[in-house]
Image (spheres, helix red, strand yellow):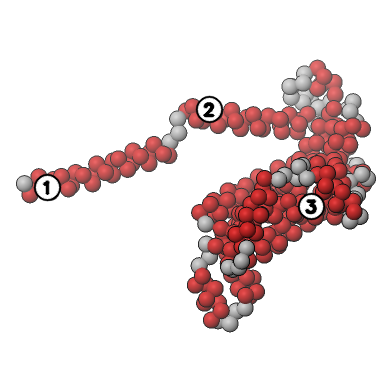
Amino acid sequence: MAITSATTNLVAPGRRGQRARRSGAALGQASPLTYVVAILFVAANLAPVLYIVLGGFRTNSQITTSPAGLPAPFQFGNYGSVLSSGIFWQQLGNSTISAVTTTLGVVVLGLMVSFVLARYSFTGRGAVYALFAAGLMFPITVAITPLYLLVKDLGLTNSLAGVILPQIAFALPTTVIILVPFLRAIPDELEEAASIDGASRLGFFFRMIVPLSLPGVVTVGILAFIGSWNSYILPLFILNNEAAYTLPLGVQAFSSQYSVDTAKVLAFTSMSMIPALVFFTIFQKRIVGGLTGAVKG
């Protein structure tokens, strides 16, 4: 009986190890169908982008003769014409100013609000947090008419400030929802140790809170930047002067002006979307990591 029991004890861990390896292999390996579906999904998302980029290297006759063909030969004049035009660089600068300023405003204000909601207890804290959560259900398109009237009354129409301020306001709910779990996950013992060392609340905020919440800050900053860069409805209502246009409006105006020159329109469109694509590609891992931390917190 002792030998049988010992043998069972020796065999059981081995079987458990085999089951664990099988389970890990099942989780780590995907079926061929999964790869096929993933490839089709990626191709469906990349095909329009590649068509626009390659279309800028073609002539109008090539596009008319073979709409889905490749450039033969490559024509660089369309991109050269776009890059040599002053209006493109002016609109690129407007988009950059709008996106960077919006990002800074969202990060600074969102981090301060999230710090208060996450670390301090006061009457109405739950209601304030619920108010920000409710803001996720109201996109900017729903409030575009009263928002335009408000911006007009403030005298901010046809200026980037009239676009930046509403973008910050409508990006704050997402920012608060993401950052509050980060700040709640920071142990209270750190704040107690910092106060014992003589650090004030502001000192604790800048020395501990900001560095520890950096993954979440980067995430909300990237989301705010891309959202501002791709914003179309709000600038369409607020901006009337072509010199103040951002790139999404510039693409529409350029398409209307050169409607018969499809190749040049594709070149202008691809040059307008490439900065956002590059920015998102570089920081996409930051977005996933920040959102994962928010869920865990």
Q: Indicate the amino acid at tag 1.
A: Ser
Q: Nearer the viewer, residue 52 or 180?
A: 180
Instruction: Give the vertical position of 223 relative to 194 (above or below).
Output: above
Mark linked to residue 36? 2
Residue beneath disc 1: 5
Q: Horizontally, is 203 left or right of 34 in the view?
A: right
- Residue 283: % across, % down: 64, 50
Residue ID at (75%, 45%) = 140
Q: Indicate the amino acid at tag 3.
A: Pro
Q: Secondary structure at mark 2?
A: helix
Residue beneath disc 3: 166
Badge 1 vs badge 3, beta-carbon distance below 8 Å: no
**Farthest residue in the front direction?**
123
Question: Mark 2 vs mark 1: which is more N-terminal?
Answer: 1
Mark 3, other Cα within 10 Å: few <14 / some 14–19 / many ≥20:
some
Q: Horizontally, is 254 left or right of 104 in the view?
A: right
Residue ID at (63%, 29%) = 43
Q: Nearer the viewer, mark 1 or mark 3?
A: 3
Badge 2 vs badge 1, beta-carbon distance below 8 Å: no
Mark 2, other Cα within 10 Å: few <14 / some 14–19 / many ≥20:
few
Question: Mark 3 vs mark 2: which is more N-terminal?
Answer: 2
Q: Secondary structure at mark 1?
A: helix
Instruction: Give the vertical position of 238 relative to 110 (above or below).
Output: above
